[in-house]
Image: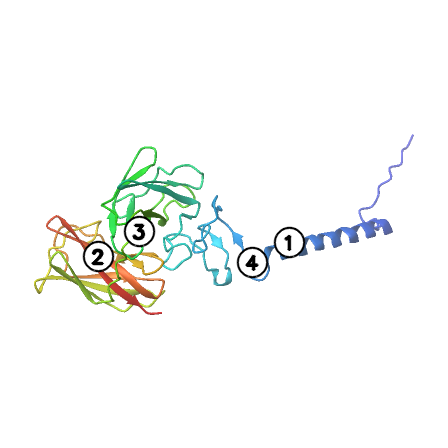
Amino acid sequence: MTRTRTTTPLTTPLTTSHRTRRALLAAAAAGVLALTLAACGSGGMGGMDHGTAPTTPAPASASATGHDMAAMGGMEGMDHGTAPAGAAGADGLAAERGGYRLDGALAGSEYRFTVTGPDGRVLTSYRPDTTKEMHFYAIRADLSGFQHLHPVRAADGGWTAPLAALAPGDWRMYASFVPGAGSGAGTGLVLSRTVTVPGQAEPVPLPAAAGSTTADGYTVTVAGAPRAGTAGELTVTVSRDGQPVTDLQPYLETYAHLTAFHAGDRAFAHLHPEAKAVEGAGGGPTLAFHAELPKPGDWRLFLQFQTGGTLHTAAVTLNVAA
């Protein structure tokens, strides 16, 4: 008995019902695509965030994450390493950035604090930055009372900064560090919080901008005219009794350490020396620093240098043009 096999050709024409179904599916797909493009914000794709959003929204001056792309026009706000001066959240005025959070409290003459990582756990891994795991700063609202410390970390990740006596008033405490773990590992961060020291606050007037100042018998002269948001150079010269000082000793891998705070909001900036790491005495009298101050107005500069095993701190006000 012979059986006949019937084979349907692959080119069988579509029926009317098939055509109708295909048309409906195509229309639906087009609608979904249109909705997706609208949600992405085709005009600049604003609001896209490729980082981990912090548990608590960061202040307006801070970027929510290290990869915040809230302003795609010109790719502003992206941070793939140490944030440049002036970048959102790089002024040190936020308590949280890139998923890292600073929490602390004043206990007598000590400030005790922790840094929490993106995973919600207390951070215990840090990478040394100029020989230290943590640089801690305290500055009063009037930019007086500057302190720069290197606290010791406990095994549980807690830090204790032993401060000198704090005058009554509003203070801001800064933690400058490089995480050794988490999504921001290897990226320099500066976080801060404010504390109020009880008592009658007596504001100290900000000294006028000047080209030189004295500290412990040394004269420090600052030359240069940086503009806000533009990279420039500041030259610092150290002398004593009219003679150039040439016996500066290494301090934090350089012959001088320079930090700055903006009058009014206390934005933070670290001015890096242009010379590489140094060894042995013999620095000076002239030192060059890379200056990139993000805001115009008065900045209070604090230069720290060491001679004969003694650390000196000289402060001078610098006016930065817009």
Q: Are the residues flagged by discs 4 and 3 in contact, CB closer than 8 Å? A: no
Q: CA distance from mark 4 to mark 3?
A: 44 Å
SS at circle 4: loop
Q: Are the residues flagged by discs 2 and 1 in contact, CB closer than 8 Å? A: no
- Total numbered labels: 4
Q: Residue furthest right?
A: 1
* Earlier-in-chain disc, 4 versus 2: 4
**Residue indicated by mark 2:** 303
Q: Are the residues flagged by discs 4 and 2 in contact, CB closer than 8 Å? A: no
Circle on res. 45: 4
Circle on res. 71: none
Residue 90, percent from left and from top:
38, 55
**Residue indicated by mark 1:** 36
Disc 1 packing (10 Å; few <14; some 14–19; many ≥20) = few
* Earlier-in-chain disc, 2 versus 3: 3
User: 297 and 178: which one is in front?
Assistant: 297
Circle on res. 169: 3
Q: CA distance from mark 4 to mark 1?
A: 12 Å
Measured along the vertical axis of the image, is residue 3 above or below residue 105?
A: above
Q: Nearer the viewer, mark 2 or mark 1?
A: 2
Measured along the vertical axis of the image, is residue 286 above or below residue 32?
A: below
Q: Residue at x 67, y 56 (%)?
A: 34
Q: Amino acid at mark 2?
A: Leu
Q: Are the residues flagged by discs 4 and 1 in contact, CB closer than 8 Å? A: no
SS at circle 1: helix
Dividing the image into 4 quarters, which one contains the C terminus?
Answer: bottom left
Q: Amino acid at mark 4?
A: Met
Q: Nearer the viewer, mark 4 or mark 2?
A: 2
SS at circle 2: strand
Disc 2 packing (10 Å; few <14; some 14–19; many ≥20) = some
Residue 215, percent from left and from top:
15, 58
Q: Amino acid at mark 1?
A: Thr
